[in-house]
Amino acid sequence: MDGRKALLAYTALDRLANACGDNQAWVLLHLADLEPIKADFPFDVVAFDPQLPADLFTNGRLT
């Protein structure tokens, strides 16, 4: 890990469910709405549709 913070973004609900499980919380946003979020929760990079390692999950949810 290089210390950067990533915002995970999935381009479709089925991709989110496949990568993070059916019980993962989610929110729908327009790209223009990312700036206010970045002001409150700074991130360095947006990762679209990432596949995540199993050790990042607890009880079927990303932790």
Image: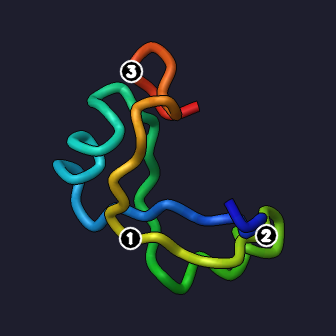
Is residue 8 found left or right of 49 in the rendered image? right
Colour scheme in use: rainbow
User: Mark 1 vs mark 2: which is more N-terminal?
Assistant: 2
Q: Residue furthest front?
A: 1
* Image quarter of the C terminus: top right
Q: Residue at x 49, y 30 (%)?
A: 55
User: Mark 1 vs mark 3: which is more N-terminal?
Assistant: 1
Pinpoint residue 6: horizontal percent, then vertical percent.
Answer: 62, 65
Q: Secondary structure at mark 3?
A: loop
Of 48 and 30, nearer the camera is 48
What's the mark number on residue 60?
3
- Contact flag, marks 1 and 3 (Cβ < 8 Å): no
> Mark 2 highlights which residue?
42
Q: Secondary structure at mark 1?
A: strand
Q: Secondary structure at mark 2?
A: loop
Q: Residue at x 40, y 47 (%)?
A: 52
What whole-number distance in Å separates the C-alpha atoms at marks 1 and 2?
17 Å
Give, as a three-letter code, the residue at label 2: Pro
Q: Residue furthest right?
A: 40
What whole-number distance in Å separates the C-alpha atoms at marks 1 and 3?
20 Å
